[in-house]
Image (cartoon, helix red, strand yellow):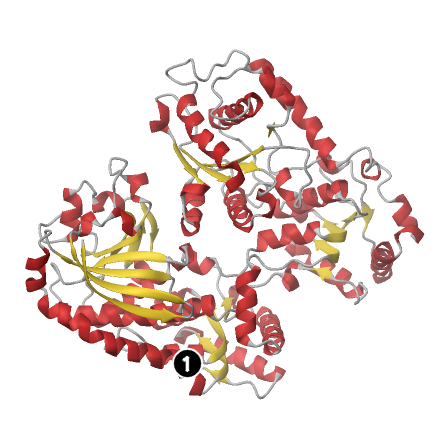
């Protein structure tokens, strides 16, 4: 592969590159670390013709047709493209494949549809935006699209691709290097002659692109500014008008950009649309099925989505219709819930968006952006009160919230969860940092996997706390039947009048401010939870784990992992993702070696992916595609933001996919203090510090102690030998944090 020329673009503190190259796309150098290879094809036609990239790939044993049957996400309904699962996972024989995934564009042949080649390039970059949540420094390699069997003019397509790519890079699309490859068989001098016109054209584009980029970065400094840019389809016009009306009631001086901008078919980059979006403090997207069908709406979302990465706090999506099938990258943004086009919910969203706008106006945007970048998963303050409730019991929650002393710091998901952050991790960490936890118990509460997890975590937090914490479970009705596994914890009647609730709220205030002078503070949890000195969380977990370990060792004393050449088991799962901090890299590597020995027919039956072997942007895909998530918990894990972030992603997947995905934990040691409790409630069977594991003799150590290697081997054997069978709750999900008292 030879690089003819490079256009460098300064984007904030980073230098990004657009390269014109020559060579064979099927032989991209491995050192390029290519994340995506872009190709184009006719709809559902992956014939390996001699003049196409599809044909060249096929000659290397990489079948586009086979990859098309294993799509990671099919976006053809809205973006005319799809992208594959990792090539090495689909085509195992393609071990030296020079790119990680394939993205294929298939513009439909529709009667009466007049799409220009330039407009199709715009469509291509809309498709690329869908994978922008996979990392911050993507490396993309592309053919000169639509110039092979499609026959479009090469100069026109080159200019459109370079122009569009440069603008999207500045807008925030996280591409570090975009390489356009002109086909040749390796003779560079011959390629220079063949493509001399295109090479000169690329060189001429340098000054033009630099000038365009300069204008793009400076446009917002002199242009008109808006408070809100409204992005909506024509069919949702009345909802956009209602939003404006309600917002103007908050402040009549608010300025809107609410013209319905259309796409220019003559340009691959929508410069006017970009300028208007960037000139706005917030972009409100009215997400609905008609929205996704409108190319201009999707373009507006993509521009603001990319700008959100560099500017911060820009997006304010309203989710109007629960029938809207959002692409994955849109799902990653927390929206305001206005399901079923509910005007009352929209009014509530308006108030929240307006309050956010006022709060952010007090902080310079550049400072706010810097804080958001260093903040990671969002700063979690200490809370006085956390209210755990099922959303169907929102009225009860509101009654409690209204009567709590306004001086108390209260966590409510509807108020405290910030858009754009992981809601699950925020809930877990906020609950752990709360002094009083109200749990509003009801049939709906116990039917919810998330509510049960909050109750489990609250119980564990009380048991583990060095300082006094209180869990106050409130029965919403006298007839409530509390499930047997929760009957060890005393519950209290919510009461039937406002005065009853006021007394409860006063009690919470007294517990926080003067716990020793409060009758309830002295008597609360006279049952199991009052014995905190004798019944610490660690002792509870150790007791239940000891019973399991004794039973497992007794049943598996004869197991010899390394003396059985054919392996011990036929695994019930096909892939493992190992999450571990760098401090446990040796254990993660041992998982690979042990799995190959344990599984019949060796490693061909299993794929083991370790966190340390992949870049950050690849880990979401690894976790999503793995059947088992094996977590190695050590001291460093609890304070590693990346580890915790991907752990939460794995927990979310397991909760939503009962009995299809499994999460297991091996703890490296049990004596050290931990800064977060919830990882300890995922699984409580395997701890390398348990001396009982020394009794086994499973085989080689791989640099680990006898107890460590035995514990790890036992965890793999147990996890892979049989599928976990749990009965989902009424919401179709399973709690992934276990009850510490069971």
Q: Is residue 20 above or below residue 671?
A: below
Q: Position of residue 85 (x, y in %)?
A: 33, 46
Q: Position of residue 253 (x, y in %)?
A: 57, 88
Q: Position of residue 190 (x, y in %)?
A: 6, 58
* Residue for point 41% across, 47% down: 621
Q: Is residue 497 above or below residue 453?
A: below
Q: Is residue 385 visible?
A: yes
Q: Is residue 707 above or below residue 375?
A: above
Toward the viewer: 312 or 403?
312
Q: Position of residue 453 (x, y in %)?
A: 64, 44
544 with respect to 164 (left or right): right
Q: Which residue is identified by label 1?
A: 276
* Residue for point 64% across, 25% down: 690
* Residue for point 59% across, 68% down: 345
Toward the viewer: 726 or 738?
738
* Residue for point 74% across, 31% down: 539
Q: Quadrant of residue 62?
A: top left
642 with respect to 292 (left or right): right
Quarter of the image where the C terminus is located: top right
How many marks on residues? 1
Toward the viewer: 599 or 668?
668
Q: Is residue 223 visible?
A: no
Q: Please rate how many residues cluster around mark 1, counting C-alpha atoms within 10 Å: few if below 14, some from 14 to 19, many from 20.
A: many
Mark 1 falls on what kind of element?
helix
273 with respect to 54 (left or right): right
């Amino acid at each position: 592969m030879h690089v003819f020329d490079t256009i460098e673009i300064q984007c904030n503190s980073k230098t990004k590159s657009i390269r014109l190259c020559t060579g064979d796309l099927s032989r991209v150098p491995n050192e390029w670390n290519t994340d995506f290879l872009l190709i184009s094809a006719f709809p559902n036609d992956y014939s390996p013709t001699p003049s196409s990239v599809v044909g060249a790939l096929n000659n290397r044993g990489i079948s586009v047709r086979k990859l098309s049957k294993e799509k990671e996400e099919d976006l053809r309904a809205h973006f005319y493209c799809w992208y594959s699962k990792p090539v090495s996972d689909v085509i195992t024989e393609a071990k030296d494949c020079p790119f990680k995934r394939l993205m294929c564009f298939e513009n439909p042949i529709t009667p009466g549809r007049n799409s220009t080649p330039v407009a199709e390039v715009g469509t291509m970059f809309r498709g690329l935006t869908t994978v922008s949540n996979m990392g911050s420094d993507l490396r993309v390699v592309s053919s000169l699209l639509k110039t092979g069997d499609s026959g479009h003019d090469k100069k026109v397509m080159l200019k459109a691709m370079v122009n569009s790519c440069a603008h999207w890079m500045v807008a925030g699309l996280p591409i570090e290097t975009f390489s356009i490859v002109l086909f040749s068989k390796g003779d560079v001098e011959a390629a220079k002659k063949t493509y001399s016109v295109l090479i000169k054209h690329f060189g001429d584009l340098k000054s033009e692109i630099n000038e365009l980029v300069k204008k793009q970065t400076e446009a917002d400094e002199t242009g008109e500014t808006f408070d809100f840019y409204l992005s909506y389809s024509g069919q949702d016009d009345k909802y956009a008008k209602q939003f404006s009306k309600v917002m103007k009631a908050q402040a009549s001086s608010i300025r809107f950009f609410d013209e319905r901008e259309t796409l220019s078919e003559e340009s691959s980059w929508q410069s006017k649309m970009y300028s208007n979006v960037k000139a706005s403090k917030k972009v409100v997207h009215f997400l609905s099925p008609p929205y996704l069908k409108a190319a201009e709406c999707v373009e507006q979302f993509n521009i603001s989505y990319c700008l959100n990465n560099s500017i911060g706090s820009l997006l304010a999506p309203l989710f109007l219709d629960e029938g809207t099938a959002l692409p994955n990258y849109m799902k990653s943004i927390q929206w305001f819930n206005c399901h079923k086009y509910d005007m009352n919910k929209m009014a509530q969203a308006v108030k929240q968006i307006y309050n956010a706008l006022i709060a952010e106006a007090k902080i310079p945007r550049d400072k706010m952006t810097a804080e958001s970048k260093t903040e990671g998963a969002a700063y979690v303050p200490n809370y006085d009160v956390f209210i755990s409730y099922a959303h169907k019991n929102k009225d009860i929650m509101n009654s409690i919230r209204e009567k709590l002393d306004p001086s108390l710091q209260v966590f409510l998901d509807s108020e405290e969860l910030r858009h754009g952050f992981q809601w699950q991790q925020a809930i877990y960490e906020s609950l752990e940092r709360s002094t009083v936890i109200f749990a509003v118990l009801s049939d709906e509460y116990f039917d919810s996997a998330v509510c049960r997890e909050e109750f489990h975590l609250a119980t564990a937090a009380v048991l583990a706390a060095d300082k006094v914490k209180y869990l106050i479970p409130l029965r919403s009705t006298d007839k409530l039947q509390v499930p047997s596994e929760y009957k060890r914890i005393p519950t209290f009647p919510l009461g039937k009048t406002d005065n009853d609730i006021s007394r409860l709220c006063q009690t919470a205030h007294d517990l926080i401010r003067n716990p020793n002078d409060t009758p309830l503070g002295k008597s609360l949890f006279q049952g199991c939870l009052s014995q905190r000195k004798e019944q610490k969380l660690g002792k509870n977990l150790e007791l239940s784990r000891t019973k399991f370990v004794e039973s497992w060792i007794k049943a598996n004393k004869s197991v010899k992992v390394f003396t059985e050449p054919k392996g011990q088991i036929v695994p019930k799962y096909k892939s493992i993702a190992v999450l571990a901090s760098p401090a446990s890299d040796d254990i993660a590597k041992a998982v690979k070696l042990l799995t190959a020995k344990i599984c019949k027919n060796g490693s061909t039956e299993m794929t083991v992916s370790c966190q340390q072997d992949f870049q950050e942007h690849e880990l979401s895909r690894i976790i999503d595609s793995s059947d088992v998530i094996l977590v190695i918990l050590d001291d460093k894990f609890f304070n590693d933001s990346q580890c915790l972030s991907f752990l939460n992603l794995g927990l979310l997947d397991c909760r939503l996919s009962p009995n299809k995905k499994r999460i297991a934990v091996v703890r490296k040691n049990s004596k050290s203090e931990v800064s977060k409790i919830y990882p300890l409630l995922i699984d409580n069977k395997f701890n390398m510090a348990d001396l009982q594991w020394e009794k086994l003799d499973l085989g080689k150590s791989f640099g680990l102690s006898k107890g460590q290697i035995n514990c790890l081997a036992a965890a793999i054997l147990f996890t892979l030998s049989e599928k976990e069978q749990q009965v989902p709750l009424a919401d179709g999900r399973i709690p992934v944090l276990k009850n510490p008292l069971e």
